[in-house]
């Protein structure tokens, strides 16, 4: 008689082996180098792909299950938020400008990350990293979609978000995050993994998501908080992939170490420069602050990154040398960035303002070494001028750094009174840089970075006006033409918050919510 | 000393998990932030399935922690029975 014996369930390690390596095969009639053509040219040597293992040991079947659960939770809250006029619960309408920055600056990057991980996953011959890249690629497109869905509710009520993707490809400051990711996906698959998987996800992502998300929670924005946490729950897996990939590459061959070190140095700096926008958001744009940029940097980079690089020292990897300069900039970064946006508020897709007395006091307490000395007097002067009717919107286009594409707004390391300029002559042309680090990145790969699409150069060359514009006519207003090209409406999407439709509408709607009309 | 950490969403599902972590890691320190609980520990932090099951009286699959995780730091190793976060140096 046959006995029905219950089959023992496989353990996690076995399940993982069956569902990754067990699905792979060795090609018989095609050459490996034809199937995986990008594995050689970056100089990285891999001897045994099976040594790579996802420490979460997540398999696709489990992945779908947990992602579906995350989606159900998220959309239940988005519905509740929308049904309940959740947008009127935020601290004050200035907060919405952080959401504008997010949808036009960050969400399009999620989509590019989706493409990047799909490409990297396809390029790797190892089934372990291939499956992990597939999951991350799916995560990233989920993030792009859920962010667009959540933020679309704000777009119904507030200005500046109506054409975020069009703006992402055109607006001057959005070329900073855009070019960062374009730089990463046009690198080889190994460099892509180090740039986004390790340097961005592992070393820097906490500085992007945790402040945005807890900032949203602190400011009553349940919608953003929820998609943020939903995205962030994938982030732990991405960070693990980033760290595992690095350890795997380093363990495979000692010749890989100097290549990886150069990439870590480059991408930590590139990522940090993009985070300038986050620094400014944390210190100036959240009506209710969570922690200062400086504090976040100290916790998530200096403390946490310090432990990470100590751990990687056994492979011969050291802390990126740019960390020294970043430490010098942490007292100044957000203030210099916000000053620049206050200057160029006529050309941005969000509103600006000067901090009020309470906010100035907060900034003084968080930045005792720098704020009262260098930035408060500047703000008081600007506030005074605005009160007298002399609010000045700068219409002269700034010089941009060839590598990070940020206007030359940063000061010399150690001297906050002097703007930092660096330059390089290359094949008869002069190129400008905001720092030694951006200059060194250019010098190592000049043929890549001479191709940068710099918004200021493009405007001056006449490439950023709507078709059919004649810049030679009498009284031509270049800014007006550029805003049309961006699909931004002057006086509605830009300028100061105080005179904005957003401010007026929010006050009126909140009034309606608490009184009988 | 190198610190590892695990940050979880503050909700009903994570309450017993946090309790279990604190029970299994006597040196761990809880840092409560808006909507988020961050648990810091020196060098190593362990999440044990058995402890969570003892607290809740239900079966628990450690992989479902994926849903409530926010961020972490350290090398990771996960099996059916435990999640271990650690620094080697």
Image (tube, coloured by chain):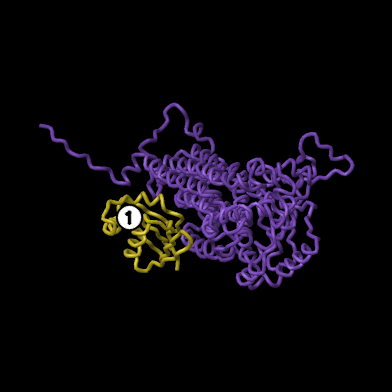
Give the mark count: 1
Q: Who is closer to the viewer here, B1 or A384?
A: A384
Chain A colour as displayed: purple
In the picture provided, is A156 more to the left or to the right than A61? right
Work out which residue is located at the far left of the displayed protein and give it: A1
Q: Between residue A265 and residue A371, name the one nearer to us.
A: A371
**Is A3 situated left or right of B42 in this image?**
left
State the residue at coordinates (57%, 59%): A91
Give the x, y percent position of residue A354. 70, 62
Task: Return the residue found at the far right.
Answer: A474
**Percent position (x, y) of residue A434?**
71, 57
Image position, residue B59 (x, y; %): 27, 51
Which quadrant is the N terminus of chain A positioned in? top left
The residue sitting at the front extreme is A516
Give how far across and how far down residue A134 sits, in percent.
Answer: 46, 40
- The yellow chain is B
Q: Residues within 10 Å of mark 1 (few under 14, many from 20)?
A: some
The extreme top residue here reads: A29
Judging from the image, mark 1 belongs to the subunit labelled B
- Residue occupied by mark 1: B82
* Left-right relation of A190 to B7: right
Q: Is residue A260 above or below residue A361?
A: above
Residue lying at 53% horizontally and 60% vertically, measured from the top left = A218
- Residue A97 in view: yes
Q: Looking at the picture, tell me which residue is in the foreground, A143 or A6.
A: A143
Task: Examine the rendering and report whether any part of residue A250 can be seen.
Answer: no
Residue at image point 67% right, 66% down: A356
Against A239, residue B86 (above or below) is: below
Secondary structure, mark 1, is strand
């Amino acid at each position: 008689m046959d006995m029905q014996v219950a089959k023992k369930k496989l353990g996690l390690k076995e399940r993982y082996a069956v569902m990754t390596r067990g699905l792979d095969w060795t090609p018989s009639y095609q050459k490996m180098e034809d199937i995986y053509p990008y594995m050689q040219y970056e100089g990285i040597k891999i001897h045994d792909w099976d040594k790579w293992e996802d420490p979460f040991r997540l398999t696709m079947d489990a992945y779908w299950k947990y992602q579906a659960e995350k989606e159900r939770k998220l959309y239940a809250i988005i519905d509740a938020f929308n049904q309940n006029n959740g947008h009127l619960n935020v601290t004050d309408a200035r907060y919405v400008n952080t959401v504008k920055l997010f949808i036009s600056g960050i969400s399009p990057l999620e989509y590019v990350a989706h493409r990047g991980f799909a490409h990297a996953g396809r390029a790797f011959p190892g089934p372990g990293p291939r499956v992990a890249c597939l999951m991350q690629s799916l995560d990233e497109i989920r993030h792009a979609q859920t962010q667009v869905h959540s933020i679309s509710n704000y777009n119904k009520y507030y200005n500046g978000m109506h054409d975020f993707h069009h703006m992402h490809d055109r607006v001057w400051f959005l070329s900073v995050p855009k070019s960062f990711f374009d730089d990463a996906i046009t690198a080889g698959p190994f460099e892509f993994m180090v740039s986004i998987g390790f340097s961005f996800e592992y070393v820097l992502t906490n500085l992007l998501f945790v402040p945005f998300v807890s900032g949203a929670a602190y400011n009553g924005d349940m919608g953003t908080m929820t998609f943020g946490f939903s995205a962030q729950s994938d982030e732990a897996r991405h960070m693990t992939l980033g760290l595992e990939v690095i350890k795997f590459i380093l363990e495979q061959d000692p010749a890989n170490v100097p290549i990886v070190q150069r990439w870590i140095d480059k991408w930590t700096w590139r990522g940090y420069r993009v985070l300038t926008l986050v620094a400014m958001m944390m210190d100036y744009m959240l009506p209710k602050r969570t922690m200062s940029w400086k504090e976040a940097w100290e916790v998530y980079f200096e403390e946490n990154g310090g432990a990470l690089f100590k751990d990687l020292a056994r492979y011969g990897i050291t802390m990126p040398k740019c960390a020294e300069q970043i430490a010098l900039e942490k007292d100044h970064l957000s203030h210099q960035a916000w000053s620049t946006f206050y200057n160029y508020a006529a050309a941005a897709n969000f509103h600006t303002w000067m901090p009020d007395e309470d906010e100035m006091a907060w900034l003084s307490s968080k930045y005792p070494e720098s704020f009262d000395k260098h930035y408060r007097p500047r703000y008081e002067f600007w506030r005074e001028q605005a009160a007298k009717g002399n609010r000045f919107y700068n219409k002269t286009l700034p010089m941009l750094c060839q590598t990070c594409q940020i206007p030359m707004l940063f000061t010399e390391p150690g001297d906050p009174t002097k703007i930092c300029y660096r330059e390089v002559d290359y094949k008869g042309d002069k190129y400008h840089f905001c720092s030694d680090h951006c200059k060194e990145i250019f010098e190592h790969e000049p043929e890549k970075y001479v191709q940068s699409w710099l918004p200021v150069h493009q405007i001056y060359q006449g490439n950023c006006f709507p078709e059919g514009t004649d810049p030679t006519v009498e009284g031509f207003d270049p800014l007006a033409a550029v805003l049309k090209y961006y699909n931004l409406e002057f006086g509605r999407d830009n300028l100061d918050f105080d005179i904005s439709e957003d401010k007026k509408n929010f006050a009126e709607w909140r009034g309606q919510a608490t009184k009988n009309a | 000393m190198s610190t590892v950490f695990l940050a979880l969403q503050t909700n009903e599902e994570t309450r017993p998990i946090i309790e279990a972590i604190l029970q299994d890691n006597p040196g761990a320190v809880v840092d409560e932030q808006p909507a988020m609980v961050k648990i810091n520990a020196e060098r190593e932090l362990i999440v044990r399935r058995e402890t969570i099951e003892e607290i809740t009286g239900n079966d628990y699959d450690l992989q479902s922690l994926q849903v409530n995780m926010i961020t972490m730091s350290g090398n990771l190793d996960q099996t059916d029975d435990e999640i271990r976060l650690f620094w080697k140096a």
